[in-house]
Amino acid sequence: MLVLMPQVAGAQYKQKEKVDPGGSNKVVDRTDRTVDLTGRAALENQGSQTGTRSEGSQGSQTSSPSDGSQGGQTGILNSGSLVGNIGTSGEETLVLTLEDALKIALSENVSVKVADKEVERAQYARKGTYASLFPQIDGSASYQRTIKKQVMYMDFDMGSLSGMAEGGEEQTGAALEMLNNPVTRASGQGSGNGRTAGGGIEVGRWNTFSTGVSASLPLVNAQLWKSLEVAGQDVELAVEKARSSRLAMVTQVKQAFYGVLLAKEALKVYQEVYDNALESFTQTERRFNVQKASELDYNRAKATVQNAIPQVYESANQVALALWQLKAILGMDLDTEIDVAGELPDWAGEMFYDIHSHDDVSLDDNTTMRQLAIQAEELANAVKLQQYASLPSLALSFNYSINAMTNDFNFSEYRWSPYSFVGLSLQVPIFAGGRRYHAVKQAQVQRDELQMQLRDTERQLKIAVGQYLSQMETKMKSYQAAQVAEETARKAYDIAAKSYQVGRSTITDLNSAQLALTQAQLAVSQAIYEFVLAKANLEETLGYDFTE
């Protein structure tokens, strides 16, 4: 029976030189040696055919069975390399340290860019608020066409006009002249002398042109001054939110970076499992061919090899997925070939320091607490802002305008009349139906709500810090125990392997020792990974920048 092994297109896992995770960018060409998961010459090009030993003929020579017989060609390793390079073979790969990845994310991550834009928006809003302190100058121009003129009625006592003192005749004549003046006469309207049928006088002209400029300047406005302070706090809040986005992004990058290292460690472990299983199968097949191993041991060894293959495939796929996730967080093109520098055990050195140095935890740099503190100040100013709405305000105003009134459109003969004034405007709020009072009460309730939220958030953050510290301490202990377990399991496996070679132990004992070794190796990597994750979360909670 032939067992055909599929081949992972495109990538052979590389064994690179160990690189310090704090090192610089490196570009490597993926042409270094690969881990040969099929590199047992005794099992390549399996041309020999093994037969099944029949009952009672254990000392007889093995026969060459026909196709389909129980002991046909193994066919395990005729498919080339089991796992290829993680990435495209032959292309240059950008090797990133953690610091390099953080720098790329700070410049390319979308969340960081959006946060920076929000800061810019808040700064423009503050500048717009400060503009209220400057004079507001506006220009205007208007044209009016009269549809129906106003009518003016005048009660003249002609007898009293004639009985006036000296100069009365001139005043009477002036009044009569006004009544007959063309300015007061309606062009085609009413009677010819500008009077209406009811005795009224139409005044004005058909066309009115007006243009001018006005300016105002607040002199005393307590509410405006307080709003300027609130606008400045809005900018501070936007800056702190941008800092929060950076801290969260740093944690995400660290998680993705450590995830790649963990996936690569798992791949190395399962490759070792496969290599060991392959070596055991080689020995078992040789012994089986010379009738020193049972068919049961032969099939168990072969099944062990087959069972190790999916684990290698799955771990290789996890490495590729972890790299894609890292590229997505960094904002890089997903087609760019990248790799991470160093190995997960390189970070084990961070596990040995005094955990209790964080017993006296300070949340002064925590971004959530900072945002709530700024919001509390804003609400306190909002209360004062509503209270200041009841205070008087004083403003300076200026106006200059010119206008012309005519019955035609002969602009060159228009007589423009200027008009201007300067004044002070005092506004004293007296009664608004309780609107200002309730606005103050609403702001006070919001302030009290935020104070309660601030205390609860501080309590929750202290709990989170305690959890992270406890988790870090637990993983330190787990790492030390896992190291001892790994050393013991490796010795046990070496003993079991040698015992199996001389026939003093079974394939089952060897598989059990391999399983214990695999579990111990994964436990070491998992302890380191969970420790650095907890440390990254602790640093985010305490508000540490990635350079600290």
Image: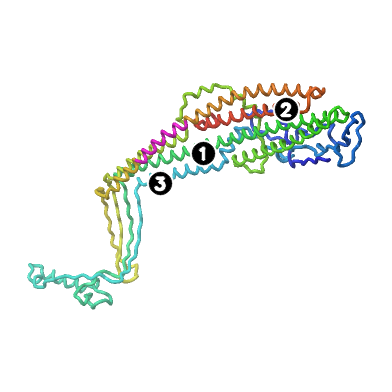
Check residue 429 in the rendering and tell me which mark sits there, or answer none: none
Instruction: Give the label on residue 128, or none.
Output: 3
* Residue occupying the point 27% across, 54% down: 421
Horizontal side of 52 relative to 419 (left or right) equals right
- Residue type at mark 1 is Ser
- Residue beneath label 1, please? 245
* Quadrant showing the N terminus: top right
- Mark 2: few/some/many CA within 10 Å (<14, 14-19, 20+): some
- Indicate whether 442 appears above or below 182: above
Q: At numbered mark 1, what does the secondary structure look like: helix, strand or loop?
A: helix
Residue type, label 2:
Ser
Q: Do the residues labelled 3 and 2 touch (CB within 8 Å)?
A: no
Q: Mark 2 points at which residue?
A: 512
Q: Nearer the viewer, residue 377 or 303?
A: 303
Cα distance in 3D space between marks 1 and 3: 26 Å
Say if mark 1 contacts mark 3, CB within 8 Å: no
Is residue 460 inside the magenta stretch? yes
Left or right: where 370 falls relative to 164: right
* Mark positioned earlier in the residue sequence (2 or 1): 1
